[in-house]
Image (tube, rainbow, N blue to C red):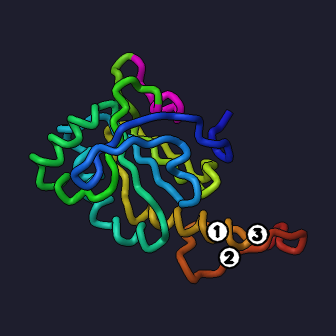
Amino acid sequence: MSLINTQVKPFKATAYHNGKFVDLTEASLKGKWSVFVFYPADFTFVCPTELEDLADHHAEFQKLGVDVYGISTDTHFAHKAWHDTSDAIKKVQYALIGDPTGALSRNFEVMIEEEGLALRGTFVINPDGFIKVLEVHDNGIGRDAAELLRKVKAAQYVANHPGEVCPAKWTEGAATLTPSLDLVGKI
């Protein structure tokens, strides 16, 4: 069974965000679009490139009303230490959630039990707490924040325009489709 269109399960976690430790729960997500970006571990190789890419696009996510959360099985203390020592991670202005018990990673079905690490899972969550986009990568494959932005825009468009869908490679302002009997076999 897929997590698509399921509600985020209850959780409690602590994040490092803008120089402070903050407590978060599923209720923290309500009323805003959210992006959860799970990654294996702090002080690694592909992870800082992804988090820096997200940091470089963070203002664009904010303009869309989207809160971004980076999540690994490290502690919030490790996130602070990484933020204080890495030039790439110093750019991060979104919350870095610690998941040392793996509970959140298990809730989102990205936990690698034998390693105690998360897969590269990306989740777009609507303001009602339902998962609308889900993508999981092998840990050797980095993600692209610009593509994630495109997916967020598509999810928001579909949410605001019932009955319309976004075709492949859709970008903001491009034509959408209205599924109907008339379109069958004509695309």
Label 3 is placed on what type of residue?
Pro
Between the residue at mark 3 and the residue at mark 1, the CA separation in whole angstroms equals: 15 Å
Helix, strand or loop for disc 3: loop
Q: Nearer the viewer, residue 82 or 16?
A: 16
Measured from the top left, where is residue 135 in percent x and y? 51, 46
Residue 112 within the magenta-colored segment of the rendering: yes
Which disc is residue 162 wearing?
3
Q: Residue furthest top?
A: 114
- What amino acid is labelled 1 in the image? Pro
Numbered range of the magenta stretch: 104-113
Residue, far right: 181
Q: Are marks 1 and 2 in contact (CB under 8 Å)?
A: yes
The local secondary structure at tag 2 comes to: loop
Could you say which is closer to the camera, residue 178 or residue 61? 61
Marks 3 and 2, how far apart at CA: 12 Å
- The vertical placement of 160 against 110, above or below, is below
The earlier-in-sequence mark between 3 and 1 is 3
Which residue corresponds to mark 2? 176
Disc 1 is placed on an element classified as loop
Relative to 95, is 63 on the left or the right? right
Residue 30 highlighted magenta (yes or no): no
Which dot marks residue 140?
A: none
Q: Which residue is mark 1?
A: 167
